[in-house]
Amino acid sequence: MGNVIVLGGGAAGLMCALTAAKRGRQVLILEKANKIGKKILMSGGGRCNFTNYSVEPENFLSANPHFCKSALKRYTQWDFIKLVEQHNIDYEERKHRQLFCKDSAKQILEMLQSECKQAGVTIWSHCEINSITELQSSTDKQNNRYKLKLSRGNNEPKINHTLSCESLVVATGALSIPSLGGSGMGYEIARQFSLKLTERRAGLVPFMFSDNFKAVCERLAGLSAEVEVSCNGQKFSESLLFTHRGISGPAILQISSFWHPGDSISLNLLPGIVADQWLCELKFAKGKSLLKTVLQQKLSKALVTELQNLWWPTQAEKILAEFTDQHLKTLGRQLNQWTVKPSATEGYRTAEVTLGGVDTDGVSSKTMEVVNQPGLFFIGEVLDVSGHLGGFNFQWAWSSGNAAGLYV
C-alpha cells in the first residue's frame, strides 16, 4: 500500500504527508490514537500558537545547535503563515511575536486535513504497530524497503495488516503528555536501527517543591506575577503562576528547559527596578509608611504578606524610617534575587516537550533521512530538537515535516 508510510498524525506527520502527496507519492498515515492532531487541538489554550514572527536557530535546544538551520530556512514561518491565510484563518499576534488562531485550533487541524485530503493522503487511526522489518531489495519488486505488521480497530478482535513501503517516516512525537498520545515508540524504532539517543527529560514544564516554599505556593495558588527568572546563565521575563504543587506560567516553563535536578532558580520579583536603591530612596520619601504598604504598589497584597512572613516578620509594624539602610538593602537584594530550589518538575504528564531524543548526528539535516538507513526518516519532536515556548515547536514540526516530505 503506497510508497510512503508516516507513523503519527500530529503536526509533523501531517505536514510531511501532504508535502509528499503533492509530489505524487502515495501516502498512508498510521495514527495510534482514535483521531489525529490531538496536541494541535489542545495547544495554546485551544487557540494553537502555530508559529512565531521571529524564528531563529537560537530559539531551539539540541546537542547540535546547527542541525535545525537548514529545515527552518527552507520552510519558514512565512510559508506556514501563507498557508493559514490561503485557508482564510483569522490569527492574531500576542506578546513575544507569537501567532494564535483568533477562533480555534480546530481550524489549523482542519486546514491540514483538507490539504491531505486534496492531495490524496490516506489516514488510518486506532493503529498499533507490532513489528517493523527491513526488506532485502531482492525480495521486493516495488523497491519497498520496509514491512510493517500492525493491528487496527477500536474493537476486539482487531484487524491485522501487513504493509510495505519504500519510505517510512517516524513522526510519533515523544514522551510528553501521554494522555494526548505521547509515547517512546519512536525511540524504540531508532534503537532497532542502531541510532543513538541523547538523554531525554521533560521540558516546558512546571516546577514542584518539597520544602517550606511549597506551603507558600499553596497559599498563593492562582496568583500570577510578572518576573524575571534565571538559571544556568539563561533568563526569561514573563509571568509566573503559583499553583498547589509549585510554580508554573510562561517564565517557569521557559526556564525549566535549562534546569537540572539539584539546581536553584532565581526569581526577580521587581524586574527593571534596582530594589535595594529603591527601598533606600523610599525610606526618605515615605519614611512613615510600612514596608508592606509601599511594596503593594508593585506586588499583590497576598504575595507581599507571604514575603513579610518570610523576610521581616518581627518588623511588620515598623515604619520605613526605622529600618537600617543595610536591612533595606538586604531585602532589596532578596526581591531582585529570590532563590528557590525545585524538588522536581511535574514530569512528562504536563510537559509540553521532551528535551533530547534521536541523536541528530545520524540524520541528514537537509532531508531528515537516517544517514545509514535509506528510506527511514525522523521528524518533529522525536528528534533531539526542542523549541522555546511561543510557537517554535510547531514551526519545527512544519519545517522538519516539509523537509522529509520533499524527499520521501
Image (cartoon, rainbow, N blue to C red):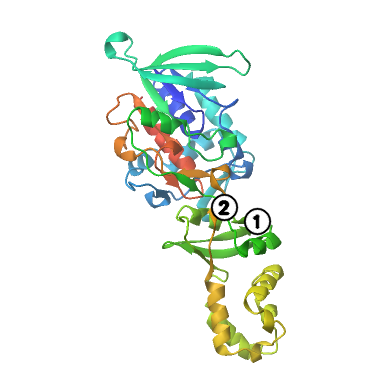
Q: Considering depth in this image, is 177 or 95 the residue closer to the camera?
A: 177
Q: Please state which amino acid type lies under the numbered disc 2.
A: Pro
Residue at 61% in and 39% down: 42
Element at label 1:
loop
Is residue 54 shown left or right of residue 367?
Answer: right
Element at label 2:
loop
- Quadrant where the C terminus is found in the figure: top left
Q: Considering depth in this image, is 264 or 362 the residue closer to the camera?
A: 264
Residue position for label 2 = 206
Q: Quadrant of residue 35?
A: top right
In the displayed structure, would residue 77 be above or below residue 110?
below
Residue 14: percent from left, percent from top: 49, 29
Residue position for label 1 = 243
- The answer to whether mark 1 and mark 2 are in CB contact below 8 A is yes
Few, some or many residues within 10 Å of mark 2 (<14, 14–19, 20+)? many
Residue at 43% in and 40% down: 396
Few, some or many residues within 10 Å of mark 1 (<14, 14–19, 20+)? many
Residue 176: percent from left, percent from top: 52, 40
Residue 311: percent from left, percent from top: 62, 77
Is residue 67 shown left or right of residue 10?
Answer: left
Q: Considering depth in this image, is 304 or 118 the residue closer to the camera?
A: 304
